């Protein structure tokens, strides 16, 4: 492991990476606490804020340009922002099953599946953690 690729990355990428890694860790903590508890609600609010930062910061990352400055990953960012609103509205309206499904789907697709792609050769996460 070497932090050089991370420290040499633009600030927007550093912010994106730190907040995304924090969101992955927080996701595991949220799954470990009783649903609906004060801790769950507090951690959930923090997670929503972190995911919004991850999604919004992605628009400043334009290395993979396919459509102007954007790439297909930016569609995922739009999906995340829409899903955050949907999940929070569902929780506030007492539609807990919808909230749960939306949050679980978002955590899986946005953090774990998309996150796995960041470990492909040539990517900063690969170089940082796998010494690529």
Image: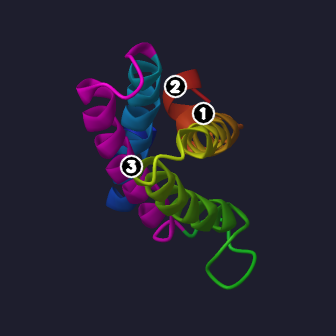
Quick check: marks 2 and 1 in contact, CB under 8 Å? yes
Numbered disc 1: secondary structure: helix
Whether 41 is among the magenta residues is yes
Question: Residue 66: percent from the left, percent from the top?
Answer: 75, 75
Numbered disc 3: secondary structure: helix
Instruction: Using residue 99 as the reference point, say whether residue 26 is left or right of it.
Output: left
Determine the residue located farthest toward the bottom in the rendered image.
68
Question: What is the magenta segment's predominant secondary structure?
Answer: helix
Q: Residues within 10 Å of mark 2 (few under 14, many from 20)?
A: some
Instruction: Please give the residue where the numbered disc 2 appears in the rendered image.
Output: 129
Identify the magenta region: 32-61
Disc sitting over residue 126 in the figure: 1
Task: Name the residue: 51% across, 53% down.
Answer: 90
Whether 1 is among the magenta residues is no
Label 2 to label 1: alpha-carbon separation: 6 Å
Instruction: Please give the residue where the numbered disc 3 appears in the rendered image.
Output: 48
Label 2 to label 3: alpha-carbon separation: 26 Å
Numbered disc 2: secondary structure: helix
Question: Residue 106: percent from the left, percent from the top?
Answer: 61, 45
């Amino acid at each position: 492991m070497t932090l050089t690729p991370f420290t040499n990355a633009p600030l927007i990428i550093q912010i994106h990476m730190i907040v995304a890694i924090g969101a992955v860790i927080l996701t595991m903590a949220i799954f470990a606490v009783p649903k609906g508890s004060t801790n769950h609600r507090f951690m959930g609010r923090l997670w929503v804020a972190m995911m919004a930062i991850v999604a919004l910061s992605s628009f400043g990352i334009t290395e993979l340009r396919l459509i102007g400055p954007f790439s297909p990953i930016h569609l995922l960012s739009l999906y995340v922002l829409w899903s955050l609103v949907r999940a929070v509205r569902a929780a506030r309206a007492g539609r807990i099953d919808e909230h749960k499904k939306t949050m679980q789907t978002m955590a899986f697709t946005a953090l774990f599946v998309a996150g796995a792609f960041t470990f492909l050769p040539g990517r900063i996460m690969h170089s940082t953690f796998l010494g690529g």
